[in-house]
Amino acid sequence: MSTSDIAAVKTIEDFADQADEYKDAIKKLVRSHAINELYGAQVFDEPAIALAPTPYAKWLTCRVAMEEYGHHVRFKELGQKLGMSEAELMPGGDKKPLSIFEYPLKNWAEFCVIKLLADLAEILQVEDLLHCTFHPLRNLARATMPEEKFHADFGKEFTSEMIRTPEGKAAIQQAINDYFPVLPGFFGRDKSKNNEIFRKWGIKLRKNEDMRADYLNRAQALVDELGLELPDVSQAA
């Protein structure tokens, strides 16, 4: 069954009439995005403003932080329209953030790599919602995608600048070695029950393992282009 075979839910009002399994699945995704967008802005983007080496870099980093906070606000607003409480859409409680947020940002090279490779993972996640059967979520994904692409381009631009010197290239490679091993975890576990439900209802398109494989291929091509290396993550899942 393809997404086109599943009836679209075009409005918030129509959402209330859907099956509980569908509503719970949508709420899980909205909650995850709201919480993780806020964590990313707080843990990485805002602190990176002080680490940025030039006024130009600070200006663009401020834009990245503003947009990431904006993504949180948009997903939070959608969640509240679906009947979720503010507490459900904020950090805390039983919803744990992505593991990458457990590693405090230490330097500019790390931020460049996070934008280069972590935001690439986010692009794949958003891509999988671009044809979501719940149109308010689909439309939100389509609205945020250009900003996600800008963040990844930001990472590539400043990574490319840093690797022009041996010292900068070494710092970037170390950041890749430190952060990349946790990034495949963005895509969840193989044979995920949640993912099976998402695909059943046309909320997402692909299996976690297929998305992870696609991500690893794209990340490899990207670092190859830059003359860098990825650490072995063959055991990551």
Image: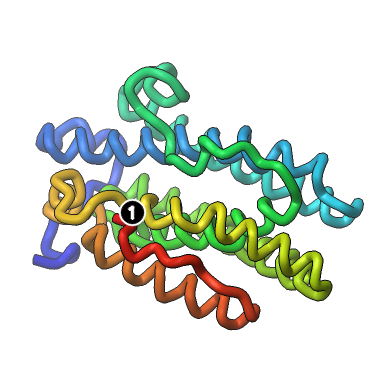
Between residues 143 and 30, which one lies in front from this camera angle? 30
Between residues 180 and 160, which one lies in front from this camera angle? 180
For the C terminus, the quadrant is: bottom left
Q: Picture coordinates of residue 166 (x, y %)?
A: 80, 72
When asked about the image quadrant of residue 130, the answer is bottom left
State the residue at coordinates (63%, 56%). 175
Q: Is residue 228 above or below residue 159?
A: below
Q: Is residue 170 above or below residue 34?
A: below
When asked about the image quadrant of residue 88, the answer is top left
Q: Picture coordinates of residue 157 (x, y %)?
A: 72, 69
Judge left or right: residue 158 versus residue 126.
right
Judge left or right: residue 202 versus residue 87.
left
Q: Is residue 68 visible?
A: yes
State the residue at coordinates (20%, 35%). 23
Q: Is mark 1 on a helix, strand or loop?
A: helix
Q: Picture coordinates of residue 162 (x, y %)?
A: 78, 67
Q: In this view, does 235 lie above or below 182?
A: below
Which residue is denoted by mark 1 in the rendering?
187
Between residues 46 and 2, which one lies in front from this camera angle? 46
- Within 10 Å of the Cα at label 1, are there few (<14), some (14-19), or many (20+) other Cα atoms? many
> What colour scheme was applied to this rendering of the protein?
rainbow
Say what amino acid the circle numbered 1 marks: Phe
